[in-house]
Image: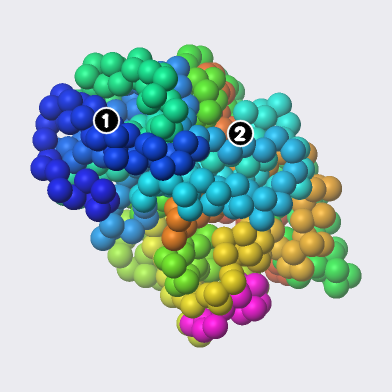
């Protein structure tokens, strides 16, 4: 847990609400006069509570949720409201985003994090469905709940002038009425009444055949083509409930839910980290090549061995590994990449996996890292520029935040997952996005089935099958 609240005993709610109010007053009195524009952080430790249970009882404000993939960390984070926001609706450079974030982080209380993400293509404007997310959007929430194996920490973020003017009083008064009780979750969703795919099978086949012609012509080596599956529902689809069910089906993934308003949410279960940075230490990974899992141990082992021996999948994975090496080498003093991939086994799929670790050069910051890594050949293709141009030409929908960096940034560290295996939730609609890496030897039929495998976790949650 954060060292900010290390001197406080864990306590139940609503005792924690009274303590948090006192902490806000103490922090304001001790730190409020130093810089009027800074963000202050007041925290209390609580008995362990679920951020999803908490978020499910709140409406009318921005909300988000995130959880780690690492079982030894087992960290969940929920946020409500906005203490500070940095949002861009026009194309923006990574340098401008991180300059804005660090202008606040470097002068504010320790322990602060901005949470948010980017569009897949930060150089293009969003369509109507993605407009509320912006090209890039990061927030420091008004309330942040971090939960680990041993307990929870609730933090309140505010500016000194807000405390001085009394603007915080209505929000503070709501604290005692908030529910952190364990929730009984619904077992069913409204039935989907229709499904449509963009592109459809004919369009998908045509796109893959164009890619295969590009390979023969030598203009491309790999391209990642995506598909949108749109489900229409008879009733309201709650994104928090959807994520709760999705977490149970995909325990080895990063989970996220970003809700800029009540009318829309971006939800996903991603197996893939883009990168994690602690000071100058960085870790990332190559994940490419897919087989299904089997409940039969012998068959599961056979499928994994088949994946490891597949020339097509090894080539696809090598494009990603070599792309990461080429991207990070200029930014790192030292770089460690395993020679051969291993298997990353998830609930219903397994992938070729190569971990990457490095020590960054002094001048290499998050803007440079993101600019170098995103999109990796696992998300775009190779060569990157040609692949992205072809994706823009072929895909008849806006990827939005799908396959883009989502995560958090603090003063000295950052972590971003790749927002794959994800969906855009609206009251009676769910658009699922997933992609497949196309290389020489790919067939439209096999790549269509690979995407079906990747969205099966969502479909199982929706239909119970």
Q: Residue at x 61, y 79 (%)?
A: 329
Is mark 1 in CB contact (under 8 Å) with mark 2?
Answer: no
Q: Classify mark 2: helix, strand or loop.
A: helix
Q: Nearer the viewer, residue 348 or 57?
A: 57
Image location (x, y in percent) of residue 285: 50, 68
State yes or no: residue 332 in magenta. Answer: yes
Which of the colour schemes (rainbow, by chain, secondary structure, one colour) is used? rainbow
Is residue 159 visible in the rendered image? The answer is yes
Image side of residue 390 versus residue 134, left or right: right
The answer to whether 138 appears left or right of 25 in the picture is right
Q: Residue furthest right?
A: 217
Which residue shows up at 43% across the image and 46% down it? 108
Q: Using the image as rendered, state which of residue 392 and residue 304 is in the foreground.
A: 392
Looking at the image, is 420 positioned above or below residue 283? above
Q: Quadrant of residue 175?
A: top left
What span is colored magenta in the figure?
323-337
- Find the distance from the CA under tag 1 to the CA under tag 2: 33 Å
Q: Quick check: 294 above or below 285?
A: above
Which residue is tagged 2? 133
Residue 45 painted magenta: no
Residue that mark 1 sits on: 25
Question: Going 19% across and 41% down the picture, which residue do you hit?
Answer: 45
| Residue 180 in sight from this viewpoint | no
For label 1, the SS is helix
Splitting the image into 4 quarters, where does residue 43 fall? top left
Across and down, in percent, residue 298 comes to 33, 68
**Of marks 1 and 2, which one's residue comes earlier in the chain?**
1
């Amino acid at each position: 847990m954060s060292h900010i609240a290390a001197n406080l005993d864990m306590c139940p709610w609503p005792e924690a609400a009274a303590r948090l109010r006192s902490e806000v007053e103490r922090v304001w009195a001790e730190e409020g006069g130093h810089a009027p524009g800074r963000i202050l952080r007041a925290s209390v430790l609580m008995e362990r509570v679920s951020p999803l249970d908490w978020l499910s009882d709140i409406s009318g404000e921005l909300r988000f949720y995130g959880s780690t993939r690492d079982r030894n960390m087992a960290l969940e984070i929920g946020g409500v409201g906005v203490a500070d926001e940095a949002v861009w609706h026009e194309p923006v450079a990574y340098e401008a985003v991180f300059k804005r974030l660090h202008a606040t982080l470097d002068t504010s209380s320790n322990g602060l994090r901005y949470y948010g993400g980017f569009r897949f293509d930060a150089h293009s404007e969003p369509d109507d469905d993605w407009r509320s997310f912006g090209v890039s959007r990061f927030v420091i929430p008004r309330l942040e709940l971090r939960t680990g194996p041993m307990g929870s920490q609730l933090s309140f973020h505010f500016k000194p002038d807000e405390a001085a003017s009394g603007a915080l009083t209505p929000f503070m008064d709501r604290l005692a009425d908030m529910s952190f009780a364990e929730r009984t979750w619904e077992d069913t969703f409204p039935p989907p009444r229709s499904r449509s795919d963009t592109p459809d099978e004919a369009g998908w086949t045509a796109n893959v055949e164009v890619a295969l012609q590009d390979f023969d012509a030598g203009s491309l080596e790999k391209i990642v083509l995506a598909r949108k599956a749109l489900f229409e529902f008879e009733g309201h689809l709650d994104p928090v409930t959807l994520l709760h069910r999705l977490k149970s089906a995909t325990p080895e993934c990063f989970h996220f839910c970003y809700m800029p308003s009540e009318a829309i949410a971006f939800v996903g279960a991603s197996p893939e980290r883009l990168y994690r940075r602690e000071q100058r230490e960085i870790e990332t990974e190559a994940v490419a090549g897919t087989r299904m899992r089997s409940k039969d141990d012998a068959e599961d082992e056979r499928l994994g061995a088949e994946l490891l021996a597949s020339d097509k999948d090894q080539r696809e994975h090598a494009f990603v590994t070599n792309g990461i090496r080429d991207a990070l080498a200029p930014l790192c003093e030292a770089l460690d990449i395993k020679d051969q991939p291993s298997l990353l086994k998830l609930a219903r799929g397994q992938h070729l996996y190569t971990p990457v670790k490095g020590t960054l050069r002094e001048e290499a910051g998050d803007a440079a890292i993101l600019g170098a890594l995103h999109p990796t050949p696992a998300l775009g293709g190779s060569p990157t520029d040609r692949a992205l141009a072809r994706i823009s030409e072929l895909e008849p929908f806006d990827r939005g935040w799908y396959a883009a960096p989502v995560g958090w940034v603090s003063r000295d560290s950052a972590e971003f997952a790749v927002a794959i295996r994800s969906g855009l939730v609206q009251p009676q609609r769910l658009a699922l996005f997933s992609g497949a890496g196309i290389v020489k030897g790919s067939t439209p039929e096999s790549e269509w089935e690979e995407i079906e495998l990747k969205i099966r976790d969502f479909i199982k949650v929706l239909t119970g099958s």
